Amino acid sequence: MITWMQRHKKWLIITIWISTIAFIGAGFVGWGQYSYGDKAGAVAKVGDVEISQGELQKAYSRLYNQYNQVFKGNFDEEKAKQFGLQKQALQRLLQQALILNLANDYDLTVSDKEVIEVLRSQKAFYKNGLFDPELYKQVLSQNRLTPTEYEAELKKELLIEKTLKLLPVETSENEKNVIASIFKIADKINYKRLALSDIKVDISDAKLREFWQTRKNDFMSDVVYAVIYIKQAPVTKEYDAKKIAAYYQDNRTHFKDKEGKILPLSAAKEKVIEELNKKATKDQALRKYIAFKKNKLDASVTPKDANISVSNNPFNADVLSKVSKRSLAAPYMKPIAVGESYYIFKLKKIIPAQAKSFEAAKEALIPLYMQEMQKQMLAKLAVKSVKNFTGKTTDFITVNAADKLKDLSQVEATEFLQKLFVSDKKRGLITLNDGNVVLYNILEQKMLPNTNVKLNGEMAKLKSAIFNEGLIKKLQNMYKTEIYIKGL
């Protein structure tokens, strides 16, 4: 019986493939330089759904923060590369896009009312027992999000959830009993961890250049947008009482206190003047934009030159996104806010991405070369050692005994045990997501009389995961996937 269960315990692994929006991230994390093709505004497209550079960075940031919490603040970019976080983030977005295409085909939508209901249920935006609009904006601002961005992301996640709910999964009592029995399996093992960091790699120029010759197209320069621009600095004016009162009357709902009550004019006056100045600044920028297009700029206004790319952007991501969508046939861009000022751009030239020289690529080449060589050399060492290694011996442990493997991190131990309890080999090796390898030898196996694991809906989750995996494969055949970012 135990032997049969050992072969079939792969059903222990519950893979939840679809990512859901992390409530509020802990800021954004960058991931270095990657090269983009002609679709500079998007990193991928699935069916009719585009995935933007900004979406990928946010997905990466959320994933990074999740790992950082698991590692108790000891997670860094090097570990992120080892775990392949860039690829994981992109895969999550690709899977989401597949579901969104399905939702679009069936005309499924999420109303503003549904979004509002979810927002009002999120207690992090509550103050004194009530949803606080100002706190909502403040929290989002601290995390570099606008309400529009957050609500758009929330609407997307609700649409994915609504789509998947149309495909319910039911479980039987026998199925629940089977999975409960599986959690009673215990193994006594001897194991040894082999770490990538212990592998020394020759990084001489000769070795690096040889590697670079096979990977030239992975090290491309950024697409560069040469532009001419005009800056409209913030406008400050004096307004008479009549003008201030009229604007306040027309826009009273803009001016509220922390409790959401509309401020009287006396208390809102400074904010009214601030809005009037912002409006005057934008109006002035629009006038310059029209004059710029008609080649009738005032002699006192001198346009300046700039180059904008992913790695060299003196403005902001919104500017890069909008400039990348312009063409030489329609080069002018309407005023766009950058801080307190407005900028008007004219696209002058597009410099396509090109393969970098060895010297230019060397800095980015070294970690990739080391990672690949370390993995190759570690794999050879693991295969050579697996038949006669001597490691540490455990007591009888179950799939949930990650804390018993002291020389592995919590993440490594959890992953190792999950993979161990799907293997049908008595002796073998397991390669972890971070590239490290664990050798193992199962010495004994037994069935425990009971388990302390709470199986609340685990079979339903398992069946949903299996169903979802099949659904994703089906959707991949239905909707074409194009990836424009290189290196992933």
Image (cartoon, rainbow, N blue to C red):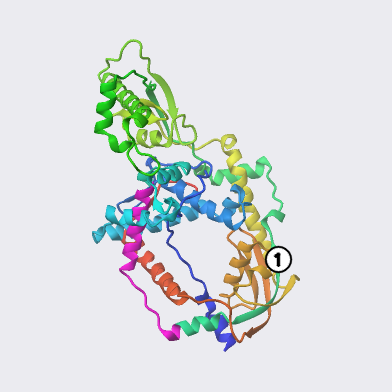
Residue 358 within the segment the image draws in magenta: no
x and y, in percent, of residue 433 in the image: 58, 60
* Quadrant of the image containing the N terminus: bottom right
Graded by Cα atoms within 10 Å as few (under 14), some (14 to 19) or many (20 or more), the crowding at tag 1 reads few
- The residue under the point 71% across, 51% down is 200
Instruction: Examine the rendered structure and indicate whether residue 439 appears above or below residue 269.
Output: below
x and y, in percent, of residue 225 in the image: 40, 30
State which region is magenta.
Answer: 150-175
x and y, in percent, of residue 376 in the image: 63, 57
Residue 443, quarter of picture = bottom right
Instruction: Examine the rendered structure and indicate whether residue 481 appears above or below residue 53.
Output: below
**Relative to 6, is 395 on the left or the right?**
right
Instruction: Examine the rendered structure and indicate whether residue 39 appears above or below residue 451.
Output: above
Q: Nearer the viewer, residue 198 or 304?
A: 304
Magenta: main secondary structure equals: helix
x and y, in percent, of residue 38 in the image: 38, 40
Q: Which residue is mark 1?
A: 406
Q: Nearer the viewer, residue 220 or 265?
A: 265
